[in-house]
């Protein structure tokens, strides 16, 4: 394993912390939609695809703010898949 330099560590933390804060903000904005613990993999995967289309549209319009919003949405759906996978909520992965 390669040990990152102090400069690299700071850059990683800065990037992750800023992105994480925006992800949390988006989750709070959508709290009325409920949690993801009962969403299946196919649904969440489909939502990622939809958000990627919205991201592409924002980028093609050079809409920095829209792209940032869509990136957080994509990441949040990835986090939801990860969370459900880690806690064994996907019937697709049960033995």
Image (spheres, grey):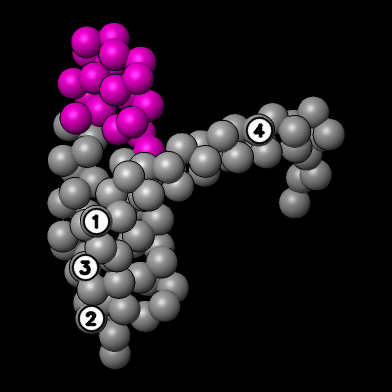
Q: Distance from label 1 to label 2 (Cα)? A: 25 Å
Q: Which residue bears the numbered disc 1?
A: 32
Residue depth check, mark 2 versus mark 4: number of the one nearer the observer:
4
Q: Residue at x 30, y 33 (%)?
A: 70
- Dot 1 or dot 3, earlier in sequence: 1
Q: In this view, does 64 lie above or below 81?
A: above
Residue depth check, mark 3 versus mark 2: number of the one nearer the observer:
3
User: Which is the main secondary structure of the residues drawn in magenta?
Assistant: helix
**Residue 76 appears in the figure:** no
**Residue 20 appears in the figure:** yes
Q: Where is residue 69 in the image (x, y as percent from the top left)?
A: 33, 31
The image quadrant where one finds the C terminus is: bottom left
**Label 1 with label 3: CB-CB less than 8 Å:** no
Label 2 CA crowd tier, 10 Å (few <14, some 14–19, many 20+): few
Range of the magenta residues? 54-72
Residue depth check, mark 1 versus mark 4: number of the one nearer the observer:
1
Q: Which residue is drawn at 24% across and 46% down?
A: 48
Q: Does dot 3 land on a helix, a strand or a loop?
A: loop
The label number, if any, that marks residue 39 in the structure image: 3
- Dot 3 or dot 2, earlier in sequence: 3
- Dot 1 or dot 2, earlier in sequence: 1
Label 4 CA crowd tier, 10 Å (few <14, some 14–19, many 20+): few
Q: Does dot 2 land on a helix, a strand or a loop?
A: helix
Instruction: Decide whether residue 90 is among the magenta residues.
Output: no
Residue depth check, mark 1 versus mark 3: number of the one nearer the observer:
1
**Label 1 with label 2: CB-CB less than 8 Å:** no
The label number, if any, that marks residue 14 in the structure image: 4
Q: Which residue bears the numbered disc 2?
A: 91
Q: Which residue is drawn at 79% across and 28% down?
A: 7
Q: Quadrant of residue 10?
A: top right
- Dot 2 or dot 4, earlier in sequence: 4
């Amino acid at each position: 394993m390669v040990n990152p330099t102090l400069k690299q560590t700071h850059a990683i933390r800065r990037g992750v912390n800023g992105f994480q804060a925006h992800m949390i903000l988006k989750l709070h904005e959508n709290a009325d939609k409920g949690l993801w613990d009962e969403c299946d993999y196919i649904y969440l995967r489909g939502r990622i695809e939809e958000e990627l289309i919205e991201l592409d549209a924002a980028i093609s319009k050079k809409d920095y703010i829209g792209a940032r919003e869509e990136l957080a949405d994509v990441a949040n759906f990835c986090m939801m898949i990860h969370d459900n996978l880690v806690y064994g909520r996907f019937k697709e992965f049960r033995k």
